[in-house]
């Protein structure tokens, strides 16, 4: 059966069996291997992708069911080839990863949270990543990474959906400084040294 899916902003076509999962289609047919197969029961979160902006388990959905939805994988978060998104960079800066197996799912869950809440509490972050199991880090540095990414996003003028905004109408963070630059790695390191441990 032929399916055409919108993945990371591009239409992609594959010939799949009706019982083939979205995860297997992403990995095998589209060679997007950032989403990992873990438990294959929807428990571990390693296969997390964003479907219409919401974290979803790619192992629990058939590829044919994904028709008509906007699918975002970890490969779709980078602003340009060779660059990292703010959340990806924050995970690197805070050492919020070890083996890396859970990292794509964690980052996508954090990204979805920060699209709707630019000032999450620690409890908000814990709840947002609660569907993703990490067997290495103990979660402390992952939570720190999301806090760090939120802090950096609040200091930018980049349009995004924030608390109180609608999904159709991105708004500028009112707390952002008018002349704020988008934080890069060096600026993030300076910010971290100046105001964070």
Image (spheres, rainbow, N blue to C red):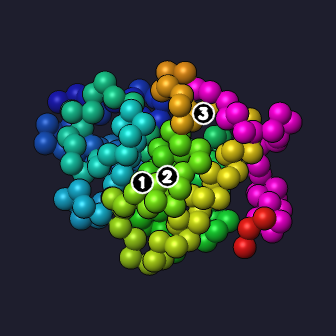
> Residue 59, position in %: x, y?
24, 51
Residue at x 45% of width, y 77% of height: 138
Q: Nearer the viewer, residue 176 or 20?
A: 176
> What residue is pinned by disc 1?
128
The answer to whether mark 1 and mark 2 are in CB contact below 8 A is: yes
> What residue is pinned by disc 2?
110
> What residue is pinned by disc 3?
160
Q: Nearer the viewer, residue 93 or 147?
A: 147
Q: Which residues are magenta?
A: 170-194
Mark 2 → mark 3, Cα distance in angstroms: 14 Å
- Residue 74 vs 168, above or below: the answer is below
- The tag earlier along the polypeptide, 1 or 2, is 2
Quadrant that contains the C terminus = bottom right
> Residue 146, position in %: x, y?
57, 58
For this orientation, the residue located farthest to the top is: 168
| Residue 144 visible in the shown view | yes
Query: What SS does tag 1 mark?
Result: helix
Left or right side of 146 for 176: right
- The tag earlier along the polypeptide, 1 or 3, is 1
User: Badge 3 local density, few (<14 within 10 Å), some, or many (20+)?
Assistant: some
Query: What SS does tag 2 mark?
Result: helix
> Residue 27, position in %: x, y?
35, 50
């Amino acid at each position: 059966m032929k399916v055409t899916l919108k993945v990371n902003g591009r239409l992609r076509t594959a010939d799949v069996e009706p019982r083939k999962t979205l995860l297997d289609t992403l990995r095998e047919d589209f060679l997007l291997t950032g989403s990992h197969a873990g438990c294959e029961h929807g428990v571990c979160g390693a296969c997390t992708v964003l479907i219409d902006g919401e974290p979803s388990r790619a192992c629990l959905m058939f590829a044919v069911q994904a028709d008509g939805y906007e699918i975002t994988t970890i490969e779709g978060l980078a602003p340009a080839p060779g660059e990292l998104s703010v959340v990806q960079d924050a995970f690197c800066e805070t050492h919020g990863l070890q083996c890396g197996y859970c990292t794509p799912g964690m980052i996508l869950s954090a990204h979805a949270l920060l699209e709707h809440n630019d000032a999450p509490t620690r409890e908000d972050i814990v709840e947002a990543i609660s569907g993703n199991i990490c067997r290495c880090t103990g979660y402390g540095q992952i939570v720190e990474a999301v806090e760090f990414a939120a802090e950096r996003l609040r200091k930018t003028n980049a349009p995004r959906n924030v608390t109180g905004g609608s999904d159709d109408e991105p708004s500028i963070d009112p707390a952002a400084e008018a002349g704020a630059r988008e934080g890069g790695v060096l600026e993030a390191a300076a910010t971290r040294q100046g105001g964070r441990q």
